[in-house]
Image (tube, grey):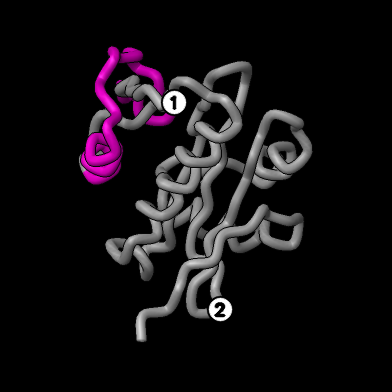
Amino acid sequence: MKSKIRLRPARKEDLPHILEIERLSFPSPWQATHFFLELYKDYAHLWVAEKEGRLVGYICFWLVADEAHLVNIAVHPSFRRKGVGEFLLKMFLRFAARKGARRAFLEVRASNRVARHLYEKFGFKKDGVRRSYYQDTKEDAILMSKDL
């Protein structure tokens, strides 16, 4: 039997698990303070995905006016390619549309082909490039968006 993914708002006690996934996923991971602050911003949403009794992924996004901004998403390496990222993205887009967002936006590293493919699968299109956006590597960010 395939175990189900459970989604819920993140809590302070989830931060060590979120930080572990963050460190395993990105060359310049967010610090604990970044995630902690997202828990208390009225426009921010930080959700976690649980599967098989473990926190296996998270998504952080902002709803501002009629726009949804995906600011961070990651899945633990042991649970990648098992539908967790797709589930998180689908729930984000549904929630944002229900809350009145008309368009969703994100930035993604130019080299992150896996993430770009996932976003394209969900209908995101390239809008432009932010040159040298990522301070750690001076890598470009691809700007993407989609109508909701």
Callout 1 secondary element: strand
Image quarter hosting the C terminus: top left
Q: Amino acid at mark 1?
A: Ala
- Location of mark 1 (residue): 104
Q: Position of residue 47 (x, y in %)?
A: 60, 51
Pinpoint residue 46: horizontal percent, then vertical percent: 62, 45
Magenta-highlighted residues = 114-141
Q: Identify the residue at horizontal 49%, vertical 65% (top origin).
A: 56
Of residues 62 and 36, which is closer to you in this image? 62
Asked if residue 135 is among those painted magenta in the image, a careful observer would answer yes
Tell me the number on the disc at residue 143: none
Q: Which residue is mark 2?
A: 53
Residue 122, image quadrant: top left
Q: Residue at x 62, y 20 (%)?
A: 64
Rendering quarter of residue 81: bottom left
> Which quadrant holds the N terminus?
bottom left
Looking at the image, tell me whether mark 2 or mark 1 is earlier in sequence order: 2
